[in-house]
């Protein structure tokens, strides 16, 4: 029986992963944790075990693993790309020192560990189109440095200590339940809110900037499918390229106009987030994930747009 601890459980991925894992594994077997309580998450906190855990506190981590007899850790605690550039030291501290603590606990207590990497682990020297699974990685953001280093550290713990580490390189994730916190791809979430509220959106990423993206239900499936995958099939283990679509702002606007014809898109480019986006791939080759654990996303741009708008109309009551 899996007994799961999720760190960063009140974040964009964590809130949805906690709910889905509690459905699959049983509420009592999925311990949600976060470094602080956040408004609006009462239902999640009350629907199963919840702990206040800062991944920079190894004693609290170890105590929760012992208390709940955890055998699987999903480490989502992280500072994202744009926020990371505002406070690179805090980004390193949470993303790397936090990961180190989680890896040490996983080693000492024989836990499987899933922790996500990101397309941010690539940089300007990486081939931009159909970026290969194995290629040059010279990220130019602190977030990207922590993701590339995290991939290597997780590989090391598997090879040196036999810790069952697993992870994917997520693209931009789009969801309606919890807003993203400080990423470069966040425009692709905000645009749906603004389309419904004001029928217009001013985008901080410039026209023609392609980035890989994925709808959150596919991201949740990727985490659970990789956790349940046959370890013997995994060659890449900690850094699988996964993607569902690649688009630039005009494409998501055109998709929205299929449902809201009057929608208008304008631009006010943020040079910092534009520079970050320019350093990332245009599109990923995710064939390794498809071959090694049957990765197969369900949503494309238009089916995502339809579902996002339907769900946000209810959430925003518009
Ligand atoms: C970010 N949403 O923008 C995250 C993600 C690929 C992007 O890692 O920082």
Image (spheres, rainbow, N blue to C red):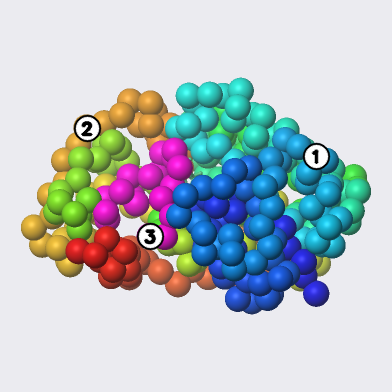
Whole-percent x, y for residue 24 in the image: 64, 76
Q: Which label was assigned to residue 218? A: none
The magenta stretch spans residue 191 = yes
Identify the residue shown where x is 89% and y is 53%.
109
Q: Is residue 127 rendered magenta in the image?
A: no
Q: Position of residue 160 (x, y in %)?
A: 90, 45
**Type of secondary structure dominating the magenta stretch:** loop
When asked about the image quadrant of residue 65, the answer is bottom right
Could you tell which of marks 1 and 3 lies nearer the N-terminus? 1
| Label drawn at residue 58 | 1
Looking at the image, which residue is at 42% across and 60% down?
177
Which image quarter is the N terminus in?
bottom right
Density class for disc 2 (Cα within 10 Å; few <14, some 14-19, many ≥20) is few
Up the image or down, 143 lies above or below 133; here it is: above
Q: Mark 3 falls on what kind of element?
A: loop
For mark 3, what is the residue? 176
Hey, which residue is sitting farthest left in the picture?
Answer: 262
User: Which residue does the image show at 84% across and 62% down from the upper left?
Assistant: 69
- The answer to which of marks 2 and 3 sits earlier in the sequence is 3
Q: Nearer the viewer, residue 63 or 173?
A: 63
From the image, tell me which residue sits under label 2: 268
Q: Report if residue 309 is visible in the image.
A: no
How far apart are the two marked residues, 1 and 2, measured between alpha carbons? 42 Å
Magenta range: 176-193
Report how far apart the C-alphas of labels 1 and 3 lie in the structure: 33 Å
Count of numbered marks? 3
Figure check: 125 above or below 290: above
Tell me, yes or no, if residue 256 can be seen here: yes
Q: Does 70 sit above or below residue 75?
A: below
- Say left or right for 275 vs 253: right
């Amino acid at each position: 029986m899996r007994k799961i601890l999720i760190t960063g459980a009140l974040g964009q991925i964590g809130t949805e992963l906690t709910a889905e894992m509690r459905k699959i594994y049983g509420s009592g077997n999925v311990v949600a944790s976060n470094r602080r309580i956040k408004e609006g998450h009462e239902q999640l906190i009350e629907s199963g075990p919840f702990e206040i855990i800062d991944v920079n506190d190894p004693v609290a981590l170890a105590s929760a693993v012992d208390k709940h007899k955890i055998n699987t850790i999903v480490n989502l605690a992280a500072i994202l790309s744009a926020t990371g550039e505002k406070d690179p030291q805090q980004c390193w501290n949470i993303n790397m020192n936090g990961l180190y603590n989680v890896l040490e606990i996983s080693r000492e207590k024989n836990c499987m560990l899933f922790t996500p990497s990101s397309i941010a682990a690539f940089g300007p020297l990486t081939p931009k189109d159909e970026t290969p699974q194995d290629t040059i990685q010279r990220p130019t953001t602190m977030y990207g440095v922590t993701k590339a280093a995290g991939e290597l550290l997780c590989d090391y713990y598997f090879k040196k200590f036999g810790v069952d580490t697993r992870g994917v390189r997520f693209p931009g994730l789009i969801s309606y339940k919890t807003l993203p916190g400080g990423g470069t791809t966040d425009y692709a979430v905000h645009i749906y809110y603004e389309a419904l509220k004001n029928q217009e959106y001013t985008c901080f990423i410039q026209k023609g900037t392609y980035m890989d993206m994925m709808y959150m239900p596919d991201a949740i499936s990727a985490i659970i499918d990789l956790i349940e995958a046959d370890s013997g099939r995994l060659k890449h283990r900690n850094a699988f390229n996964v993607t569902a679509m690649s688009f630039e702002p005009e494409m998501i606007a055109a998709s929205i106009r299929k449902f809201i014809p009057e929608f208008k898109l304008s631009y006010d480019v943020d040079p910092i987030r534009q520079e970050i986006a320019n350093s990332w791939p245009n599109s990923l080759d995710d064939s390794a994930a498809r071959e090694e654990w049957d990765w197969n996303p369900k949503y494309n741009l238009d089916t995502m747009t339809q579902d996002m708008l339907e769900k946000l109309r209810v959430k925003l009551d518009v």
